[in-house]
């Protein structure tokens, strides 16, 4: 199976190099695992009098009666008259004219296959695939013809689909259709799967549509199963092998806060999640939990309560945010919530003064400082904790795994990690990308929230928007106006922002109206000052770039205007909209866009108007952008699938995960004889990663 492809009959050094370079096919195994990307039904023959102008690829049985070469401006074209008992049509070639002219046979039955055009009053098929009927009858013919994805280079160098089929055929003959089974009898039975052999045969040479479906089913399951097996196993290893601090008591800080200072009753979802976290903290293993909750679902209070558990057990906590503004917001929120308790918390960001930094470093090492809130500045080597027990990371996709790992280095034991994200991740994607984390979901908003009215307006309707703003301001509300800031076109974007600010300032003149502006080029002290003015309701309108995207909490703000909304991604739009609707009042989100929109942009804006369910939005986003583009998951590799599709095959994915969980529950080391095939395959897949070595 790992024989170089160069030894396969019909390949040779030149083709081997080409296959490697263009398709990553180096060995026999690579070739058999290169699955067709679609199939054509060749059980059906068309008659010429049944043809229609928009037929897709079809096959016809008939004969050539004459051939002529027609000179044209560039080169020549070959036209053959092709007939069956019902009519006449043309076959046309623009390339290879000379060679074809000599090799085409007159009055001998051919099976032709291709796309049909209606051209100059006759049907014609350009560059048909064709085969003499006598050959057609002899060859290893299957109902469904596989089509392999290809490249232009391959086509030009003569590796056509036909050649690819032939190579697969040769290879199957050579290995005599023997594939090692990779799954256990039990799983094959339980899932009613084809055997590996049957599946491999039918994926390349399907005997029927039914068998093709079953082959696909089997191979998709297998692919997803082994990924899930690894993820579930990693999780299992972490839980059983990686020790964590035991936070055994819920002490006076937690209880005191919970009973006396909690500003509201927790929602049931918040309570449930808190319970999940408490279990993790007390059971002796390291917590690695992803906390998902839509914008405004109340993750902050969960974070604060978790921090209090750490403090009750005499551990320090770090809370890390992706931007300075968000770090400041968190800091203010935590300080405010814990105001009545004697707890020390400090803020550390890129702009913290050296003198302040020194104090922070010292107090962290002595253990005097209990909570450190900040940006990635916290990850710097100089920052040493006395006993970091808990790290809470907000908006995780911006940090990534490498930095998560860095937190570990700061301790003898890894701190418990709680990752919070407001970008809902579709369940299936979460299962694949974060399948080794535990996941908690806050799936309920605090009571009394009114849903946000979302409206899409074209730029020409700007006056209508101004009108609404004036009404809302008259009611004492505040407004965000957000401009896109995309790095490549930064200069232009800043110009838009400044122009926008000026026109808003003209429309909403001082002293009646106060307008703030915040953007990334301002000094952080100025940013903070402007944010604070808005938070204190000293200004009516906040004009900003996406720096306010995450986390800002101003319940009195009731309108979110998003300029050039077509330029934002769906999850970003959803995040921005989440900045309003935090108070009891009716809130609005207005998406301003130009008139010309791409189909994707239309879908995004429509989706926003139709729903404010973050999970639904995430599903649409996933469909529009494909899994690879979401949240920097490209690197994760688990999305590099050969045959399965996380979106379309979500049912199989869930099944694969539950089968993997069941299996590892019964046989955590896959040491039972009946699971040997699975173990062998697993080792084969991961032989470079040495994962197995760690555990057995
Ligand atoms: P997010 O999940 O987006 O971080 P926050 O934690 O900022 O959400 O909470 C959003 C708002 O909802 C805050 O003003 C917070 O005080 C409020 N809130 C959170 N939980 C509750 C609750 N159980 N009942 C009422 N209000 C709540
Ligand atoms: Mg938040």
Image (cartoon, helix red, strand yellow):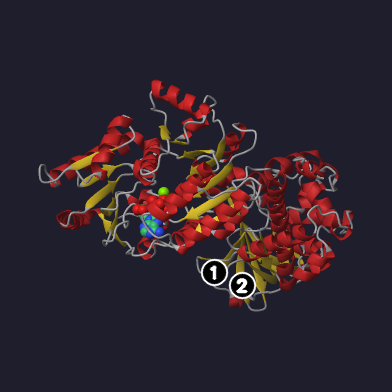
Category of crowding for the residue at label 1, using alpha-carbon neighbours closer than 10 angstroms: few (below 14), some (14–19), many (at least 20) = few
Q: Name the residue under label 2.
A: 88
* Secondary structure of the residue carrying numbered label 1: strand
Question: Which of marks 2 and 1 precedes in the sequence?
Answer: 2
Relative side of 585 to 100, left or right: left
Residue 287 spot, x, y in % from top left: 61, 47
Q: Residue at x 54, y 50 (%)?
A: 250
Q: Which residue is drawn at 81% across and 61% down?
A: 196
**Which image quarter: residue 228?**
bottom right
Along the viewing direction, whichever of 116 and 372 lies nearer the viewer: 372
* Secondary structure of the residue carrying numbered label 2: strand
Along the viewing direction, whichever of 139 and 104 lies nearer the viewer: 139
Q: Which image quarter is the C terminus in?
A: top right
Asked if disc 1 and disc 2 are in contact, CB closer than 8 Å, the reply is yes
> Is residue 575 visible in this depiction of the protein?
no
Q: Name the residue under label 1.
A: 122
Vertical placement of residue 643 versus 47, above or below? above
Residue 160 spot, x, y in % from top left: 70, 52
Ligand 1 quadrant assignment: bottom left
Vertical placement of residue 335 versus 60, above or below? above
Category of crowding for the residue at label 2, using alpha-carbon neighbours closer than 10 angstroms: few (below 14), some (14–19), many (at least 20) = some
Asked whether mark 1 lies closer than 8 Å to ligand 1, one says no
Relative side of 261 to 53, left or right: left
Relative side of 10 to 23, left or right: right
> Is residue 675 visible in this depiction of the protein?
yes
Which label was assigned to residue 426?
A: none
Residue 467 spot, x, y in % from top left: 16, 57
Along the viewing direction, whichever of 539 and 11 lies nearer the viewer: 539
Q: Residue at x 61, y 32 (%)?
A: 409
């Amino acid at each position: 199976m790992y024989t170089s492809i160069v030894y396969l009959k019909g390949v040779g050094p030149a083709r081997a190099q080409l296959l490697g370079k263009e398709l990553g096919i180096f060995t026999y195994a690579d070739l058999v695992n290169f699955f067709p990307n679609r199939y054509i039904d060749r059980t059906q023959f068309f008659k010429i009098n049944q043809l229609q102008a928009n037929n897709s690829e079809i096959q016809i049985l008939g004969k050539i009666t004459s051939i002529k070469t027609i000179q044209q401006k560039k080169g020549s074209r070959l036209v053959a008259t092709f007939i069956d008992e019902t009519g006449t049509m043309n076959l046309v070639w623009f390339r290879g004219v000379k060679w074809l002219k000599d090799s085409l046979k007159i009055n001998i039955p051919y099976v032709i296959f291709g796309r049909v055009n209606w051209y100059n009053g006759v049907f014609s098929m350009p560059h048909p695939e064709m085969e003499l009927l006598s050959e057609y009858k002899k060859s290893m013919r299957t109902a469904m013809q596989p089509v392999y994805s290809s490249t232009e280079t391959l086509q030009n160098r003569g590796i056509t689909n036909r050649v690819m089929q032939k190579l697969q055929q040769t290879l199957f003959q050579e290995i005599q259709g023997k594939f090692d089974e990779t799954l256990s009898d039990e799983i094959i039975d339980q899932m009613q799967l084809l055997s590996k052999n049957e599946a491999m045969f039918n994926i390349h040479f399907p005997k029927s549509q039914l068998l093709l479906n079953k082959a696909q089913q089997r191979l998709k399951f297998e692919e997803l199963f082994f990924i899930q097996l690894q993820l579930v196993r990693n999780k299992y290893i972490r839980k059983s092998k990686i020790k964590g601090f035991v936070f055994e008591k819920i002490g006076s800080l937690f209880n005191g806060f919970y009973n006396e200072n909690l500003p509201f009753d927790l929602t049931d979802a918040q309570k449930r999640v808190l319970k999940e976290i408490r279990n993790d903290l007390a059971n002796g293993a390291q917590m690695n939990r992803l906390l998902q909750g839509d914008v405004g679902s109340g993750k902050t209070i969960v974070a604060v309560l978790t921090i209090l558990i750490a403090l009750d057990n005499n551990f320090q906590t770090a809370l890390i945010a992706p931007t300075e503004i968000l770090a400041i917001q968190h800091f203010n929120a935590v300080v405010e919530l814990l105001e009545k308790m004697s707890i020390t918390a400090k803020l550390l960001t890129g702009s913290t003064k050296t003198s302040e930094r020194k104090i922070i470093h010292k107090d962290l090492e002595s253990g005097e400082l209990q909570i450190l809130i900040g940006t990635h500045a916290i990850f710097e080597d100089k920052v040493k904790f006395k006993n970091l027990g808990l790290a809470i990371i907000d908006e995780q996709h911006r940090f990534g795994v490498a930095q998560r790992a860095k937190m570990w280095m700061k301790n003898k034991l890894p701190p418990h990690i709680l990752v919070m994200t407001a970008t809902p991740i579709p369940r299936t994607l979460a299962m694949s990308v974060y399948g080794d984390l535990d996941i908690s979901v806050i799936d309920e908003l605090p009571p009394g929230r009114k849903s946000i009215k979302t409206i899409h307006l074209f730029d020409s309707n700007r006056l209508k928007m101004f009108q609404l703003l004036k009404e809302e301001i008259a009611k004492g509300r505040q407004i965000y106006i957000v401009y896109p800031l995309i790095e490549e076109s930064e200069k232009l974007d800043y110009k838009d922002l400044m122009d926008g600010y000026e026109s808003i300032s003209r429309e909403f003149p001082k002293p009646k109206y106060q307008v703030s502006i915040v953007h990334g080029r301002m000094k952080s002290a100025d940013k903070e000052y402007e944010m604070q003015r808005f938070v204190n309701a000293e200004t009516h309108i906040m004009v900003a770039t996406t720096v306010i995207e995450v986390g800002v909490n101003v319940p009195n703000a009731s309108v979110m205007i998003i300029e050039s909304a077509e330029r934002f991604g769906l999850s970003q739009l959803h995040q921005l909209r989440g900045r309003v609707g935090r108070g009891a009042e009716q809130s609005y989100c207005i998406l301003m866009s130009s008139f010309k929109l791409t189909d994707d942009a239309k879908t995004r804006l429509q989706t926003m108007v139709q729903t404010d369910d973050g999970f639904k939005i995430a599903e649409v986003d996933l469909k529009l952008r494909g899994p690879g583009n979401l949240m920097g998951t490209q690197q994760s590799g688990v999305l590099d699938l050969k045959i399965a599709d996380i979106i379309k095959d979500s049912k199989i994915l869930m099944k694969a995960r539950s089968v993997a969980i069941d299996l590892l529950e019964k046989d955590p080391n896959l040491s039972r004889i009946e699971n040997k095939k699975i173990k062998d395959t697993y080792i084969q897949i991961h032989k470079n990663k040495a994962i197995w070595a760690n555990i057995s």
